[in-house]
Image: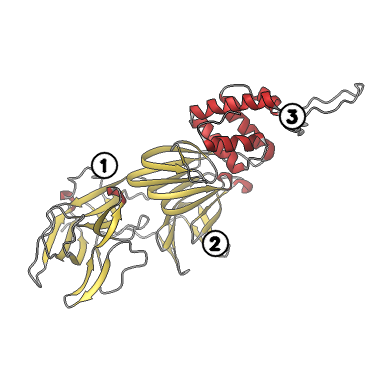
Amino acid sequence: MTESPNSRLDVLFVRYWDNSLTPAEGDELAGLLAVDRVSREWFQLLSMQAVAAAELPAFTLPTLEPQPTPSAPKEARRGWSRRRVLGLIGGGLAVGVGSVALGQWLWNEKPDTRISLTNVRGTVRMRAADGHLLPAYGPVPSGATVSTEGIGASAVLKYPDGSTVSLLGDSAITVTDGGRGLQLHQGAASAELHSREAEDRLTLRTDLVTLANASGVMLTLGQGIRATEVEVQQGAVSVSDPTGEPLAVVRAGELLTVDANGDRLQRRTPATPDTFAWDLTVPLPEGWHVGRREVGALGPVLRPEPWPDPYYNGTVMHQIRSDKQWTRGFFRLVEGSTIHVRYRADRACPRSQFCFCVRTPNTRCPDTGMVEYNNGFEACAPGEWKWVRVHAADMLHNKHAPKFGLPWTGFLIIFNTYEEDIGLQIAEFRVSPPG
């Protein structure tokens, strides 16, 4: 047989023709054929070649096979060859997608759990279980991982019954169990799950928690470096650890935080405060991303560390980056909010900055933006400290400024001196409300 330009398509076709596709491979093949015209044409050609060359061993479909009348002589049941399957399905696209769908029905009687990737914004990638890149739209095969990357990126996984799971910000999620399972690796996902029969309910997981049999619930699931957060807006969900040991039932208006040590805190979802301050007298929290705390003769400070920033294609920058707090947020900003920074630097860096990633007050909304101070830091004499005080309304002169209304919830704090190490030290960072 002629080989197609896509070696993965050839492998899937052979397994399809041998009736040995796993459900995950069936999903993968269906997704490939649904979105790739060239693959559909090659699949049709391969099917025609295989039909012309040979027929596969028979298997029985009694509901589709006419039964002999009592008076008719009993004859051998005809096997269902690939030629007959293709004949039932029809030509063109149906040869590809239809045959896969029929094949899945023949060996998998579970209800339809196919997922579509929709509402793609920004940089979104979808990779199959074997790691190869798939088009970032349309059907999502079991085993595939969908990731959103960068400011403003988001995507929605949509189920046939209208249930949705939205990826927010820098996030990654893997579809498992034919669509009945979702594993959140990082970031945040907002789920609106319609009521389902018990055998068709979804299971959401992170490395730290499992939300089994989720149905009729609206929630936001956040996975940081060292902790998972479960915020429920409507309904209720049972949460267990990865071994199945029950942890809590989280109800509407509640937030559960589980850290890597197994410690958990369940409470009413806290309001994001208008005031905020770093307490550098204590160690940095678990999950702090970039930057180190030092205690010296001038007191405790935060110093930048070199870090390959993906926004700048992996260029190593000198930065301080807090942990991400999508669900709770660090602080709430309005136009008159004032940001106070006390710092010192060995050298001036006019293009250095501090900035915040912000979202709307609704944790289920994927909209994000940036507020930035880009006027740089000045050189300081030995032992000298300088202050920057700026209103939030004066931090909107950048291309990623929020396009949604106030208030803004800051969920990530960044100090950046780009590729230059200027000996920056941050001794104080706080936010105060108007007045």
Residue 196: x %, y % from top left: 58, 45
Q: Amino acid at mark 1?
A: Lys
Closer to viewer: mark 1 or mark 3: 3
Q: Earlier in the sequence, mark 2 or mark 3?
A: 3
Mark drawn on residue 290 = none
Which residue in the protein does label 1 denote?
A: 403
Q: CA distance from mark 2 to mark 1?
A: 39 Å
Q: Residues within 10 Å of mark 2 (few under 14, many from 20)?
A: some
Which residue in the protein does label 3 denote?
A: 80
Residue closest to the eye, 333 or 134? 134
Q: Secondary structure at mark 3?
A: loop
Q: Which residue is pictured at 26% across the width and 50% down the height?
A: 407
**Horizontal placement of 410 versus 57: left or right?**
left
Q: Earlier in the sequence, mark 1 or mark 3?
A: 3
Q: Which residue is pictured at 17% across the width and 49% down the height?
A: 393
Residue closest to the eye, 31 or 3? 3
Q: Secondary structure at mark 1?
A: loop
Q: Amino acid at mark 3?
A: Trp
Residue closest to the eye, 409 or 86? 86
Q: Quadrant of residue 433?
A: bottom left
Contact between labelled residues 3 and 1, with CB atoms less than 8 Å apart? no
Mark drawn on residue 242 = 2
